Image: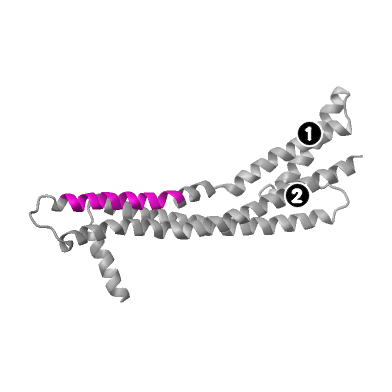
Amino acid sequence: MPPILAVNVIHLYSITDIVGQVIVAGLGIVSLVAWTIMFGKFFELRRLRELNHAYERSLRGESGLLNLGESYRSRRTIPYGDLFADAVEAYWRAASIGKERGSDTSRFRLEHTENALQRALARQILRYESSMIFLASIVSGAPFLGLLGTVWGVLVAFDGVAGETSTNIQTLAPGVSAALMTTTAGLLVAIPSVFGYNILLASTKQLITELENYASSLADRIELESE
C-alpha cells in the first residue's frame, strides 16, 4: 500500500499544471524551514534556561552584587548575565555622574538601574520571541496557499473539459485530484507547525516570566545593598 500511495502522489504531481507544482514545491520548502525553526528554537530555549539557572545559582551564593568581578558582567550571551551587567554598570555610571554634579543619592542610582533593567529585559524578550512571528505566519498562511492551489487546479480542470461535448467523472477526476493535492500539502505543513508553535509559545512565556521575576529580584537585591 505505501508504494502505491507514493506512485499516486508522484503521478498527481506530474499531471498538475505549473502553478500547482510551484505551490507544492514551495510548501515543501516552507515545511523544511518550519521544522528547522521549531527544532532550533526548542534547543535554543532549553539551553538558555539551563544557562540562566546556572548563572542565578552562582549569584545566589554571593553576599554582594555591586562589587562582583568582571567575570560576572562579561557573560552577556546569558540573558540573566546581560540583565546583571546592565544593572550594575548603570548603577556605577549613575554614581559617577551624581558625584560630578553633587547630586549622588541612592534614589538617583536606583532609578538608572531600574531603567537599565527594563531596557535589557525588553531586549531579551525580543531574543526569546525571535523567529516566532515567522513560524506563526507559516501556521496561518500554509493552508491558504494550499487552498489557492486547489481553487486554481479546479478552475483549470473545469476549463479543460468546457469545450468537450460529453463530460463524466472520469474526465474530471484526475484534474480535481491533482488540485486537492495542494490543499493536502498545505495542511501537512500547517498541522505540525501549529503544535510546534504552541509548545514553543508556552516555553517562551515561561522563560519571559522567569526573566521578569529575576529582574525584580535583582533590583531588590541591589536596592538593599545600596542602602
Q: Position of residue 95 (x, y in %)?
A: 84, 32
Camera-side residue of 127 and 67: 127
Query: Which residue is at 82% across, 47% downward?
Result: 68
The residue pinned by badge 2 equals 213
Graded by Cα atoms within 10 Å as few (under 14), some (14 to 19) or many (20 or more), the crowding at tag 1 reads: many
Look at the image and say whether residue 148 sits in the magenta stretch: yes
Question: Is residue 115 visible in this depiction of the protein?
Answer: yes
Q: Relative to residue 20, is residue 27 drawn left or right?
A: right
The residue pinned by badge 1 equals 112
Q: Nearer the viewer, mark 1 or mark 2?
A: 2
Q: Position of residue 208 (x, y in %)?
A: 67, 49
First along the sequence among labels 1 and 2: 1
Query: Which residue is at 79% across, 37% downward?
Result: 113
Query: What kind of element bears circle 1?
Result: helix
Q: Which residues are magenta?
A: 140-159
Q: Amino acid at mark 2?
A: Asn
Camera-side residue of 194 and 176: 176
Screen quadrant of the C terminus: top right
Camera-side residue of 95 and 126: 126
Q: Relative to residue 167, is residue 114 drawn left or right?
A: right
When the figure is inspected, residue 186 is found, relative to residue 101, above or below; the finding is below
Q: Amino acid at mark 1?
A: His
Disc 1 to disc 2: CB gap under 8 Å: no
